[in-house]
Amino acid sequence: MHTLTDPPADAAVLSDTETVAAPQQPRTLALGFTGDGREYFRIWVVNLLLTLATFGIYSAWAKVRRLQYFDRNTVLAGASFDFHGNPRAVLAGRLLSVVLLVAYHYAFGFSTTFGVMVIVGLLLAFPYLMRGALRFRLGNTSYRGLRLGFDGSVGQAYLAWLPPVFTFLMPGALLALYPGKPGLATLPLLLYLLWPLMHARIRRFQHAHLLFGDQHASYEVKGRRFYRFYLVGGSLGLLAAFCAGLAGGFAGAAAGNGRSATLFIAVFTGVASAYLAYLLIGPYMVVRVSNLAWSNTRFPGIRFRSTLPARDFMKLQARNALFTVLSLGLYRPFAVVDVYRFRLAHLHIEVDGDIDAAASRVTTRDGAAGDSVADGFGIDLSW
């Protein structure tokens, strides 16, 4: 006979079952960076001097050293990342990028036919090479012995990259083909109205095909959400131009009607307007797009949350720009470390249970070691 204080036997069984089956509570992990500006400054100086001494050839090894330094000092739950890229592959990508840029700038100087061939070649090659660059960067990055990766297909790369590349190349190509009809070159500019959608498609291509071992990422963001960022960014650009123009007008009124003074003020106003727009629009776009994209990227049992604050990031970038100019560029490595640490501090990873348990469920992809010689995996354009 049970008393009121004695639980029935089936309740005890149910309680045990619920205890066993209770899901593990999500745990939020923070990324950390153990490096510092002084340490990276030494690496940066050596990389710069050796790059100059070798006429740019050492830049490939410099990039690998830089990526290894930042990855190996990026810590998550007591374990650091690592980068395993081959500098020779980076050098091959650098040489290829130089050839493509020279061909683009001087193609129509040789002949119209050669120019058209170069433009078509760029349209066909660029999406494929950008896919290879993502495969190179991610496939050579590891965490807890497991390689990251990227499995976007060639067809998906063309869908993502061909429209923006076409939009960028066509005005110049039409101007070179029909120099007497500059109005034709303005027609492709209408495609820039679709640029936010193109940007959204590129981010989808980048985030929806991420791999952690054999685990595939999921990513769901509507492309139309990018229009708000561009509208606000454009408004910031107009505000910067207005402020610079207003300052230039006051300076011009104070300087009088001197021709040289007027020319100097006009040039200064233009440069100041562009620089102020850069300091406002660049950080704003980075913050909004990063927060949206990463907060909607997830792996099974692992979710990302990006909380970059726009105002603080703008202040950081403005301070870094000022110190870099005042130090004639020597503050640059300190600025890079500050921005990297700031961005990591606002990227959180939510894991169901423990990160060790999550990593133990992930297995190495079949054929991961052979990926480095397939599908342009070894190409890094550094763009």
Image (spheres, rainbow, N blue to C red):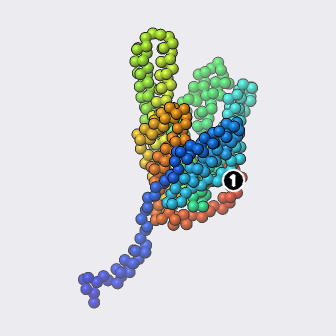
Q: Residue at x 54, y 63 (%)?
A: 359
**Where is residue 22 drawn, in percent x and y?**
41, 71
Which is nearer the eye, 381 or 272? 272
**Where is residue 367 drawn, in percent x and y?**
68, 60
**Where is residue 77 drawn, in percent x and y?**
49, 60
**Image quadrant where residue 312 sits:** top left
Looking at this rendering, what residue extends furthest in the left direction? Answer: 4
Which is nearer the eye, 226 or 236? 236
Whether residue 125 is visible here, answered yes or no, is no
264 w.r.t. 34: above or below: above
Q: Which residue is mark 1?
A: 372
For the N terminus, which image quadrant? Answer: bottom left
Which is nearer the eye, 40 or 276? 40
**Image quadrant where residue 242 sits:** top left
23 w.r.t. 53: above or below: below
The residue under label 1 is which amino acid type?
Answer: Ser
Helix, strand or loop at label 1? It is: helix
Q: For the residue carrying disc 1, how many other residues have a C-alpha within 10 Å: few (<14), some (14-19), or many (20+)?
A: many
Count of numbered labels shown in the rendering = 1
Which is nearer the eye, 341 or 220? 341
